[in-house]
Image (tube, helix red, strand yellow):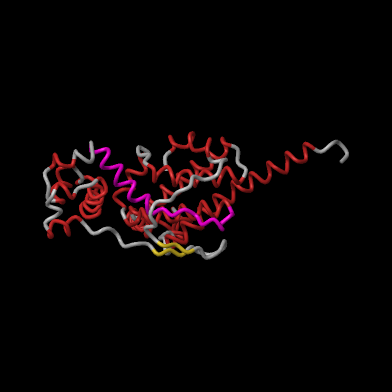
């Protein structure tokens, strides 16, 4: 989901959604508007070490953009994003480095292919889901699931540097829900930025183990000894700061954020309606 793509997307989202969908890589079932979502998501792609044990592809004729991106994603899953290079990916596949360039022209293109594979997992809301906030929640939660399956790619998504078809498809569905609710383009862009910031911020803290680490750090910093007198409120909350159910809390927080924007729109609409009424009506 890229901020620089939003201008072009907003101009199109008042029209019907584009037809055609990529292959279904996971099955999804929606429960109801007030309940948790339920998903069945494929297991993470086999790791690059698995390829090395089997000797890789071993043939340049077997290469394709997708297979190269999949190998890069496996390598990132196993050893971290910093280890991904054309040379390392070629080694995983059992081919020469230069053979990759016939399919992937640069490392940036390789990284974009990895991001695209993650966004292939982001499901589109079912047609019967009409509520705009539920559609945004649906996309956000499937994205979170996809990102957690490949956490090394999250920094690439957060950079906003990639705009492949799968990224644009998800962003289109996201902002289309906002415009169809009745937000004007400027407000829709503001809601999009707020929601995207929440999603990426929560993911970053979740993957980094922020809440558990912060509580431990607070205690080491003197919370246990000086807390009751120096930090009474933090001392009371500290045992509760660890996240017990990340998915539920993610959903609850985003739901409240969207509800706030929805309330703002309702107030603006009611005020505009009152202003249109003739005096004394």
Residue at screen point 42% across, 39% down: 2
In the foreground, 163 or 16: 16
Quadrant of image for the C terminus: top right
Percent x, y of residue 128: 56, 58
Q: Which residues are magenta?
A: 106-131
Whether residue 239 is visible: no
In this view, which residue lies farthest toward the front?
A: 61
Residue at screen point 64% across, 48% down: 263
Percent x, y of residue 17: 52, 45
Percent x, y of residue 142: 43, 56
- In the image, is 102 to the left or to the right of 18? left
In the foreground, 254 or 109: 109
In this view, which residue lies farthest toward the right?
A: 280
Residue at screen point 11% across, 44% down: 96
- In the image, is 112 to the left or to the right of 48? right
Whether residue 40 is visible: yes
**In the picture shown, does residue 123 fall above or below 176?**
below
């Amino acid at each position: 989901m890229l901020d620089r793509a939003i201008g072009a997307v907003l101009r199109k989202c008042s029209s019907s959604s584009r037809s055609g969908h990529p292959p279904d890589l996971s099955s999804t079932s929606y429960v109801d508007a007030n309940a948790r979502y339920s998903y069945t998501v494929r297991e993470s792609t086999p790791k690059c070490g698995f390829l090395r044990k089997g000797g890789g592809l071993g043939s340049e004729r077997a290469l394709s953009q997708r297979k190269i991106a999949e190998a890069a994603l496996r390598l990132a899953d196993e050893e971290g994003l910093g280890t991904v290079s054309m040379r390392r990916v070629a080694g995983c596949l059992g081919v020469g480095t230069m053979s990759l360039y016939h399919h992937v022209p640069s490392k940036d293109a390789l990284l974009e292919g990895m991001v695209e594979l993650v966004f292939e997992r982001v499901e589109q809301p079912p047609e019967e889901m009409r509520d705009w906030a539920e559609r945004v929640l649906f996309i956000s939660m499937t994205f979170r699931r996809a990102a957690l399956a490949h956490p090394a790619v999250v920094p690439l998504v957060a950079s906003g540097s990639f705009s492949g078809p799968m990224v644009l498809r998800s962003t289109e569905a996201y902002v289309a829900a906002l415009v169809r609710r009745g937000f004007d383009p400027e407000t829709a862009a503001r809601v999009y930025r707020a929601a995207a910031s929440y999603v990426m911020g929560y993911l970053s803290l979740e993957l980094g183990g922020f809440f558990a680490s912060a509580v431990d750090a607070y205690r080491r910093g003197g919370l246990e000894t000086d807390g009751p007198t120096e930090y009474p409120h933090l001392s009371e909350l500290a045992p509760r700061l660890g996240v017990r159910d990340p998915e539920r809390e993610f959903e609850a927080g985003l739901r409240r954020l969207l509800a706030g924007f929805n309330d703002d729109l309702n107030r603006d609409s009611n005020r505009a309606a009152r202003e249109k009424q003739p005096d004394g009506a």
